Image (spheres, rainbow, N blue to C red):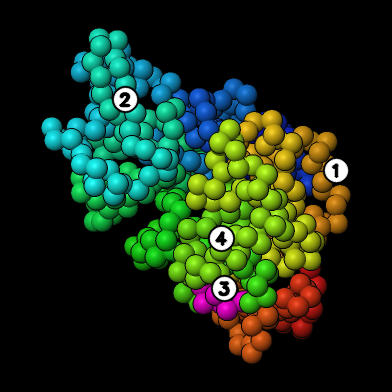
Amino acid sequence: MRNGVVLITYADSFGGNLKSLRSNLDKYFRDCISGIHLLPFFPSSGDRGFSPVRYDEIDPAFGTWDDLAKLGSGYEIAADFMVNHISRQSMYFRDWFEKEDNSRYKELFLPVQKIFGNTAPTPEEISAIYRRQPGEPWLRIEFPSGKKEQVWCTFSEEQIDIDITSETGLELFEDTVARLGKAGIRMLRLDAVGYITKKRGTSCFMVEPEIWDILAGLKKIASAYNVELLPEMHEHYSIQLRMAGRGYHVYDFALPLLLLYAWYGRDFSPLKHWLSICPRKQFTTLDTHDGIGVVDAADLLSKEQTDFTVDKLYAQGSNVKRKYSSSEYQNLDIYQINCTYYSALGENDDAYIAARAIQFFAPGTPQIYYVGMLAGRNDLELVEKTRNGRDINRHNYSSVGIDAESGREVVKRLKKLMQFRMKCGAFNGTFSILPTEDKQKLCLQWADDSESAILDVDLSNCKCTITTTDSAGRKIYIP
């Protein structure tokens, strides 16, 4: 998986289910990708799968374990574990809700007093907590007996936080890893991992050294089943550097905004700096199921550069902030901007292909979101229907739609670029940034003892050229 191109998709977004996902990939993209990150495919009560009800079943709407195994026979598969929370509709929470102290799952959940004891948190302590929504990060629950508890709830009322360090939490994790490992899953993304460290007097986000102790324990469990971990979080790039420094795979969530700044501002300087220091054991992204991250590039871009990029993104992309600013819309500008990457680049084919070329040459393994693989435009109709800002980049493609989109020239160009990234042996070598005097130009190189590949990008015309050299000679490829 790490030497190729990885697709990230929902189980039902590329044809409708796991079977059609496999058939469409085999038909249109077989030689373009090596692995698939399947977004949550378990039964769920909300948040497009990120409110899992259970981990021992595949949602029947998507298919069966056999369908997953068949998909895995052709592609390496990665999956998600929501390490911070579980559905309010899960049997775990319902059992605790019904039986209270007599529930075997009591220790899985986090009443406020479990962290703060018998002394209520002060306003200052609450203010210090890193939150994803306004107000206190917990929910008041009234049990059938009349007892009331404030239960930690970071994301939504449907997603109840769990204590992964509890005996019950570790049992749930190991049971899931064992099952997924048996099904052929070799990488598990720990979704929202930064929120699992709840400690009084802290931000309750990525608290050190506790986070490293917890991750070490989870890694030990996963390793026993031949499963690697991919911690996922959106925050300051320094956290990714620290995570990578401890040997974990990480995400390059800073790249998308840095690339947009380069296009909008005609200046590769911040991007060059980042490429010189970014982790090498990482997955690169330009688009995700959430949006384009802003906080991830903090201090890599100045506040002025960030504001400039965000304003340009709204103007040249979707105008999503201006059109969808009403409180009736969800998930608008929490910490990411809702927009497809193709629309963010003004639906300019040359700019889009050049951006993907840079991603494919950046250190790490490129991961491409299914909408991005089809150069998808903003789905404003879906946003109007669901009132969920993130749905602007969550279009569901039918098999007929995939056939039509695959015929577009920009998608054909992207497929050829993906094929190049899959086949070129230079990417097994060493990465370097070659010097350029002009801030509008970027030159990236991969080379080993027998082969080299050089990418030249010029912002003045949004054009890029790839030059490869091997035993057969020198070739020039214009994506």
Q: CA distance from mark 1 to mark 2?
A: 49 Å
Residue tagged 4:
284
Q: CA distance from mark 3 to mark 1?
A: 34 Å
Q: Which comes before the other along the chain, label 3 or label 1?
A: 3
363 relative position to 99: left or right: right
Work out whether mark 3 precedes mark 4 in sequence or the reverse, and give the earlier one. 3
Q: Which residue is mark 2?
A: 140
Q: Main secondary structure of the magenta part?
A: helix
Q: Is residue 334 left or right of residue 147?
A: right
Residue position for label 1 = 404
Chain-order first, disc 1 or disc 2: 2
Residue at 55 percent across and 75 percent down: it is 270
Amino acid residing under circle 1? Ala
User: Which residue is more in the foreground, 51 or 312?
Assistant: 312
| Tag 1 secondary structure | helix
Circle 3 Cα neighbour tier, 10 Å, few/some/many (<14 / 14–19 / ≥20)? many
- The amino acid marked with disc number 4 is Thr
Disc 4 element: strand
Vertical placement of 197 versus 251: above or below?
Answer: above
The reply to whether residue 174 is in sight is no
Residue at the far left: name it: 118
Q: CA distance from mark 1 to mark 4?
A: 27 Å
